[in-house]
């Protein structure tokens, strides 16, 4: 059955300056259709350019992997481009390029997505290709294909982690923050050892378990009509059988028992210190406040940490923070790189001083309004692109259960108060943390010590 | 007023009959669906005018989202550096670190409060002040932009802080193997006396010497309404734009910058030579191969772009297909021409597993020779042409992309009607054209090869290839003994 959700005919926003205080109204009209096999389809019409964006999310990510099989969800993503029964390798990329379309995929802790974007006349081709690899993937999969993409993914790991300055920090942070066996305790890219162990049988099992229509959501945004898209999707995907019900992992509740200091040596010129805390799930009650907190710390030159460390004290080359709420759990990170001649303990003290000042005094009204305005503009920027809209529709459907969540999403940021900021700063950034120092080879004396990591 | 319009009228495949999307009765899953012809992308008109002080204005209306992009371009750019590498980019970076009555923090605070993004910077041809603002705050945001463009303060405290940060960034370039390869490659392909010889961001010696007086003098000599172009795209009318800009920039007077009479050394042209940069213990080797390429005004531009799309400009390209998809040596391999008024570099690049560095070099050279020595397949050629021509519409989606496209045309002196012909020119490229431009511009016997990696492991294998003379270099291209 299909439900048509339509609030406003097009994007409408307040034009007059006095309405700055109230939230801009965002509207992304959509049509939702659920096929008998469980596939969810979301369509958004946007006729501003003659292009279309197709974005399918399969509800499986690295968090679904078992120990010993880390990196498999992402390796599998690579295999999805290696051909299917009616579109044998390398037809997928070639047909899309011949239609002027781009395509790619990505894997996170929680989901794997695939997208195509290009001229709207290529929509049938995009859907046919996606349907073929959802329904007819196994017949052409071979050990040789697994071996080849295993090599490619190992090169991706070398290029993006091992041969990148500070590149090994993230997997160390994940391991040190999350308890062993927690779905987020290993990195999406996986370990070389586990990648080496992946087999054709693993591939077949993984596909059968997770790549079913009932474990997928498909969004189409662009210069199309909802009726056309619905008819095409039913034609191409309708006969793919429903798969088994999927059991997703649960994350054990945990709290870091003590402050943890660690150090890794790397081929870097300047040392960097990471602070990493356990927080909350994405879209849960404090998630938006933690995003705003991150903006107040490092979102602009006049944010607390950037102004203090880079502009006033001039002890850091840069300072970065973000809140990373995920489906099962979340974490918050701050990292700062020392300017030549400055030491990590000095940076760490300044970070702690600023955090405590914010916890004690809270942000000013002007800081809060700056954050709200900046975050609202980021929303507007996103609405300029059909690919961004398509991806957000899938994301909202997956994480909050309704794709039409743009307005509510913006509203939760507008609802954050200065008191909320003070409270979440104390509650989450006042709790135990992981402090990781990345230092030049042989310079472990540059690291933040355990005593310095305990405020 | 000029009108920019773009026709995309190419049928993709034979038999792409104009049928509706939903034709259940003709459904055959074993064959790719036949596609209707692509729709024509209609671009809004570009309205242009000139203020009495010489500043040029281009306005494109896009009313879908209440945002406006303002891109202020000062012609010049890094090629003005001459004896002081990094001066142009440092001056541009300093514009928003203090202007009018505000310091760096005050500017950022105000811009963000208005929900605007304000940034400054430069490339080899121009310096930029870019502003993207919600329509409802564009007035005060433009006030800020006007301060940044016309009233930068260059206070010594701000200059010294940014100079020290830049020195730290230059130091950190040694950590990043791609940056190491690019710096070394440019130093070796473009000789001393050529504007691209040294990094656009400067080096540690020239950066150390930057001060407030030098930056102010450079600004005074190179920023003027006479060399300024403002491109505006978004939720604004031409009349509104004219009023808003005249009010803020109309009374700006500054001397006309002196015409650049920069002479340039000739890019190196020598038999293929290999330069190695040591990164002990590296998990991969970064490979850069190439030479000076072509200028943007080259009449073969469309044919060169099609040839490069086939060679290394798309996922299905020969280099990526060979090194990644067939052999698993890398996460990706590609190639490209950098277009600037003077010929920028052509580079073919990849990061490959350390122990297949020599094998990867063999494959690179095999592909260079193959595209020169034998005619490309007709299907492969059609795919590359369609990918380029039909992919164009995605570059005009947002207000920022639209402004960038117009800036690009202006930067190279191309007419606003340029895209009318572009698709036609791409689709007219023949098999013979591809081979001709490959032979003319891809010169595997006269390439510079730079490899950044663990020399203890990779050197013997590379020596055995006999590609040409081999030496070990530092990031400035100087020989290391």
Image: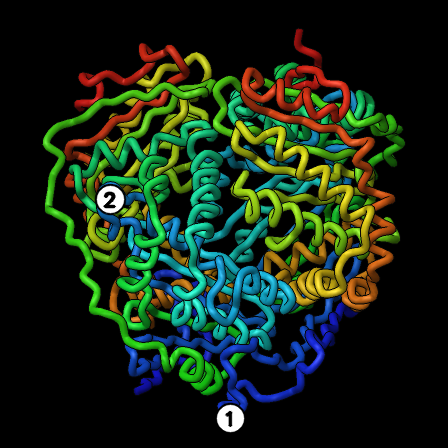
Marks 1 and 2 sit apart, C-alpha to C-alpha, by 48 Å
Considering only vertical position in the picture, is A221 above or below B156?
below
Question: Which image quadrant: the N terminus of chain A?
Answer: bottom left
Residue in front for this viewpoint, B14 or B72: B14
Q: Residue at x 52, y 32 (%)?
A: B353
Query: How many marks can you see?
Result: 2
Question: Which image quadrant: the C terminus of chain A?
Answer: top left
Residue in front for this viewpoint, A413 or A158: A158
- Based on the displayed image, in which of its 4 quarters is residue A360 positioned? top left
The answer to the question of whether label 1 and label 2 lie on touching residues, with beta carbons closer than 8 A, is no
Residue in front for this viewpoint, B305 or B6: B305
Relative image position of residue B453 (x, y in whole percent): 56, 23
Relative image position of residue A172 (x, y in whole percent): 29, 31
Circle 1 sits on which residue? Answer: B25
Which SS class for mark 2? loop
For the question of whether residue B271 can be seen, the reply is: yes
Residue B338 numbered mark, or none: none
Of badges 1 and 2, nearer the viewer stands 1
Relative image position of residue B89 (x, y in whole percent): 66, 32
Circle 2 sits on which residue? Answer: A184
Q: Residue at x 46, y 60 (%)?
A: A382
């Amino acid at each position: 059955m299909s439900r048509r959700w339509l609030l406003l005919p097009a994007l409408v926003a307040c034009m007059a300056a006095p309405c700055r205080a109230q939230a801009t109204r965002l509207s992304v009209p959509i049509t939702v259709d659920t096929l008998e096999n469980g596939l969810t389809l979301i369509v958004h019409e946007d006729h501003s350019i003659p292009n279309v964006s197709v974005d399918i999310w399969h509800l499986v990510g690295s968090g679904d992997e078992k120990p010993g099989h880390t990196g498999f969800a992402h390796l599998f993503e690579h295999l999805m481009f290696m051909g299917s029964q009616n579109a044998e390798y390398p037809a997928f990329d070639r047909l899309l390029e011949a239609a002027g379309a781009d395509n790619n995929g990505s894997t996170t802790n929680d989901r794997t997505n695939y997208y195509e974007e290009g001229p709207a006349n290529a929509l049938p081709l995009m859907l046919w290709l996606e349907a073929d690899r959802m329904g007819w993937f196994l017949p052409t999969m071979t050990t040789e294909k697994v071996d080849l993409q295993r090599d490619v993914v190992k090169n991706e790991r070398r290029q993006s982690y091992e041969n990148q300055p500070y590149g090994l920090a993230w997997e160390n942070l994940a391991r040190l923050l999350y308890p062993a066996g927690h779905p987020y305790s290993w990195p999406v890219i996986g370990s070389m050892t586990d990648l080496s162990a992946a087999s054709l049988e693993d591939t077949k099992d993984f596909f059968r378990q997770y790549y079913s229509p009932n474990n997928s959501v498909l969004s189409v945004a662009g210069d199309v009509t909802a009726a056309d898209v619905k008819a095409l999707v039913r034609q191409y995907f309708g006969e793919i059988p429903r798969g088994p019900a999927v059991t997703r992992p649960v994350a054990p509740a945990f709290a870091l028992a003590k402050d943890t200091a660690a150090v890794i040596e790397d081929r870097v010129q300047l040392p960097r210190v990471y602070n990493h805390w356990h927080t909350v799930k994405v879209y849960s009650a404090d998630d938006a406040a933690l995003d705003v907190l991150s903006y107040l710390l490092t979102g602009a030159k006049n944010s607390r940490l950037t102004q203090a460390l880079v502009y006033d004290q001039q002890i850091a080359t840069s300072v970065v923070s973000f809140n990373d709420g995920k489906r099962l759990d979340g974490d918050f990170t701050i990292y700062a790189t020392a300017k030549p001649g400055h030491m990590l303990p000095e940076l760490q003290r300044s970070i702690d001083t600023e955090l405590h000042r914010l916890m004690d005094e809270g942000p000013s009204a002007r800081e809060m309004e700056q954050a709200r305005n900046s975050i609202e503009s980021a929303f507007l920027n996103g609405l300029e692109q059909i690919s961004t809209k398509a991806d957000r529709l899938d994301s909202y459907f997956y994480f909050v259960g309704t794709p039409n969540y743009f307005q509510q999403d913006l509203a939760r940021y507008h609802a954050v108060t200065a008191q909320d900021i003070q409270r979440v700063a104390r509650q989450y950034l006042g709790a135990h943390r992981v402090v990781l120092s990345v230092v030049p080879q042989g310079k472990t004396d540059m690291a933040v010590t355990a005593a310095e990591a305990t405020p | 007023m000029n009108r920019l319009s773009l026709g995309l009228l190419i049928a993709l495949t034979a038999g792409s009959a104009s049928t509706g999307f939903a034709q259940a009765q003709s459904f055959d899953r074993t064959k790719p669906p036949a596609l209707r012809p692509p729709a024509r992308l209609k671009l809004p008109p570009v309205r242009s005018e000139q203020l009495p002080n010489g500043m040029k204005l281009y306005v494109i209306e896009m009313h879908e989202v209440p945002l406006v992009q303002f891109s202020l371009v000062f012609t010049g750019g890094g090629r003005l550096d001459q004896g002081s590498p990094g001066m142009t980019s440092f001056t541009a970076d300093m514009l928003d670190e203090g202007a009018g009555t505000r310091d760096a923090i005050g500017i950022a605070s105000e811009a963000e409060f208005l929900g605007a993004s304000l940034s400054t910077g430069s490339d080899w041809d121009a310096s930029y002040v870019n502003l993207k603002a919600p329509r409802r705050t564009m007035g005060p945001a433009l006030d800020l932009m006007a301060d940044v463009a016309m009233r930068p303060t260059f206070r010594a405290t701000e200059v010294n802080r940014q100079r020290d940060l830049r020195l730290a960034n230059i130091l950190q370039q040694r950590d990043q193997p791609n940056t190491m390869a690019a710096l070394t490659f440019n130093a070796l392909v473009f000789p001393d006396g050529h504007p691209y010889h040294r990094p656009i961001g400067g080096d540690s010696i020239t950066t150390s010497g930057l001060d407030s007086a030098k930056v102010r003098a450079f600004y005074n000599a190179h920023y003027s309404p006479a060399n300024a172009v403002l491109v505006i795209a978004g939720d604004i009318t031409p009349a509104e734009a004219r009023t808003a800009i005249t009010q803020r920039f109309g009374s700006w007077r500054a001397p006309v910058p002196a015409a650049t009479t920069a002479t340039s050394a000739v890019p190196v042209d020598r038999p293929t030579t290999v330069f190695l940069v040591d990164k002990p213990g590296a998990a991969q080797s970064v490979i850069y191969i190439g030479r000076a390429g072509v200028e943007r005004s080259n009449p073969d531009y469309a044919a060169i772009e099609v040839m490069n799309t086939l060679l290394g400009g798309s996922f299905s390209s020969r280099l990526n297909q060979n090194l990644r998809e067939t052999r698993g040596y890398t996460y990706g391999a590609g190639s490209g021409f950098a277009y600037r008024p003077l010929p920028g570099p052509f580079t073919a690049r990849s990061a490959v597993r350390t122990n297949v560095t020599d094998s990867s070099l063999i494959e690179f050279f095999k592909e260079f020779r193959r595209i020169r020595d034998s005619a490309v397949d007709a299907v492969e050629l059609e795919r590359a042409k369609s990918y380029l021509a039909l992919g164009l519409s995605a570059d005009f989606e947002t207000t920022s992309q639209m402004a960038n496209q117009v800036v690009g045309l202006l930067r190279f002196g191309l007419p606003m009607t340029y895209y009318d012909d572009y698709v036609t020119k791409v689709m007219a490229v023949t098999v013979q054209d591809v081979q001709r431009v490959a032979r003319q511009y891809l010169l595997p016997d006269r390439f510079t090869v730079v490899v950044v990696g663990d020399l203890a492991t990779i050197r013997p294998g590379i020596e055995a290839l006999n590609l040409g003379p081999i030496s070990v270099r530092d990031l400035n291209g100087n020989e290391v003994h």
